[in-house]
Amino acid sequence: MSVSVPSLTQSAEWRALQAHANAVAGVHMRDLFAKDAARFTQFSLREGQLLLDYSKNRITPETIRLLVDLALARGVPERRADMFSGAKINVTENRSVLHVALRNRAEGRGLVRPIVVDGVDVMGDVLHTLIRLREFSERVRDGSWTGSTAKPIRHIVNIGIGGSHLGPMFIADALKDHQRADLSVAFVSNPDRGQIDEVLASCDPAATLFVISSKTFTTAETMANAAIAREWISSALGEQAIPRHFAAVSTNHRATTEFGIPADSVFPMWDWVGGRYSVCSAIGLPVILACGFDAFDAFLSGAHAMDLHFEAAPLEKNMPFLMAMLGVWYAEFFNAPATAILPYDHRLKLLPFHVQQMDMESNGKNTTLAGAAVETQVGPIVFGGGGSDSQHSFFQLLHQSPRLIPCDFIAALRSKRGKDDSRDLLLANCFAQTEALMKGRTGSELAGVPEALRPHKVFSGNRPTNTILLESLSPFALGQLVALYEHKVFVQGAVWGVNSFDQWGVELGKELARSLEPALSGVEKLGSRDASTAGLVAAYLEAKRRSV
């Protein structure tokens, strides 16, 4: 299950980057901009509906050349080709990695490019599933699919967790302007009963359709909430109502049938799609139901456009590649512990959570593909929030903390409302923050400020940012943005030599939870456990006794 991966930190390319980092460590971006009036032109890219400005980074043309050299030495182009071809690059699970197949489409008047896994072109199943998703969603939306009492569906509730929750919740919220006014969509993931009770309180059972998203149809949190939803429907409408109020995204047809979901309402997943990369699959069903298939199809087209760019563009002009290598540059040669995702658009407020899972679950690894310990800190801590609110929250740390934290600023140039004066204020703040992080403020710029206050008002600046501007928050641009971050994570994993597509650390917690649950429910006595875990279990059991 391991593959040969040469040493990262002992390579000539790594040592060249270290020497270069030492040489530019004292260079300030203020001076780089002062010396080069064309710096923005040199270090920005346009692709489709996205503009990437990476000029506010601590880089020179030599930096980019050396980062390209490192990527070539680490086999990034070859690993990229393997992914697109269907090779089983997820070696620990012996699986292909083909979220790109989910949005693969014909170019011009040609045919969809075949993608073969184990001798079978997977595109037939992908396209057939898209046809089924369109047909099912249109029946729900036009009222020909009704609940058991012949009421049209007016509430969509998605039940999932992880990638089956974060991805579709983010996309549905981002495309809310495309949502039909008479259709609500909600997302449930937490086994805390309070969440699903809160959602159901605003739903009419006769007009509610649940989408249960679990590849195996055994995910503990998802199935616990699915059981609550099932009981809610059967209590209100009778057991015979179940088939009209549930759909599923799963491969476990026996379990979905036993639950009461008809085969026509079950949509497939494939083992070559990881949960955090699955939003372009049938996992997007709640988005399709709420916003319409055409909006989802445009989202897929945007993601496909970024796939084509990532696959074909020269590395030095490749958006995902450049963002990835800049992340490596700061993490490895400037000891940056984290990266911040800062959307200046209310509809993108959930983007940080989606990227957080995608990045940290993918590259938060301690073992290389060769089975050896990683040589560096590998993936960054990813956090963020809406830019306007975050300015009054954690931006203080970004500006003046000794820690260097690179930031991605994301905004849409145009709003759906057309001329929108409020956007002037929004984007003024967005652009000003990147300028302030880059320039800082020197003591000489504090004329008239008392001497005792000057140290508090000096900002070092020289803090790197990328700015990603969407022409508008269209489904196409959103698809480009999602694929941009997916491929960024892929490139970084390839450089670090880790498997970005498994998540064994997640599994340990699940195993231990399964072994604890019988003790917490009172079915079994607690076995041998550490003193802390035993004490916590005892405190909970005592609280349960008091609440009877």
Image (cartoon, rainbow, N blue to C red):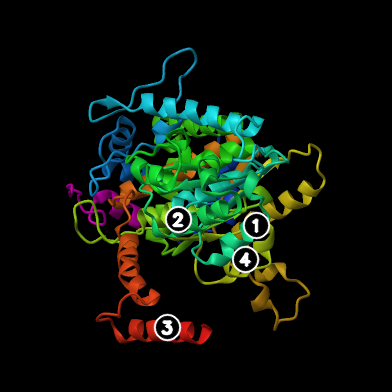
Residue 516 vs residue 29, the one in the foreground: 516
N-term mark: 3 or 4: 4
Quadrant assignment, res 314: top left
N-term mark: 1 or 3: 1
Residue wearing tag 2: 222
N-term mark: 4 or 2: 2
Mark number displayed over residue 541: 3
Residue 4 vs residue 157, the one in the foreground: 157
Residue 368 vs residue 197, the one in the foreground: 197
Residue wearing tag 1: 387
* Boundaries of the magenta span: 1-24
Disc 2 crowd, CA 10 A, few/some/many (<14, 14-19, 20+): many
Q: Amino acid at mark 1?
A: Gly
Badge 4 vs badge 1, beta-carbon distance below 8 Å: no
**Residue 135 placement, left or right of 9:** right
Task: Residue 314: tell me if it is visible.
Answer: no
Above or below, 282 relative to 202: above
Mark number displayed over residue 439: none
Q: Position of residue 226 (x, y in %)?
A: 48, 54
Badge 1 vs badge 3, beta-carbon distance below 8 Å: no
Residue wearing tag 4: 395
Q: Residue at x 62, y 36 (%)?
A: 146
Q: Nearer the viewer, mark 4 or mark 2?
A: 2
Disc 4 crowd, CA 10 A, few/some/many (<14, 14-19, 20+): some
Spatial CA span between label 1 and label 3: 43 Å
N-term mark: 1 or 2: 2
Spatial CA span between label 2 and label 3: 24 Å
Q: Amino acid at mark 2?
A: Thr
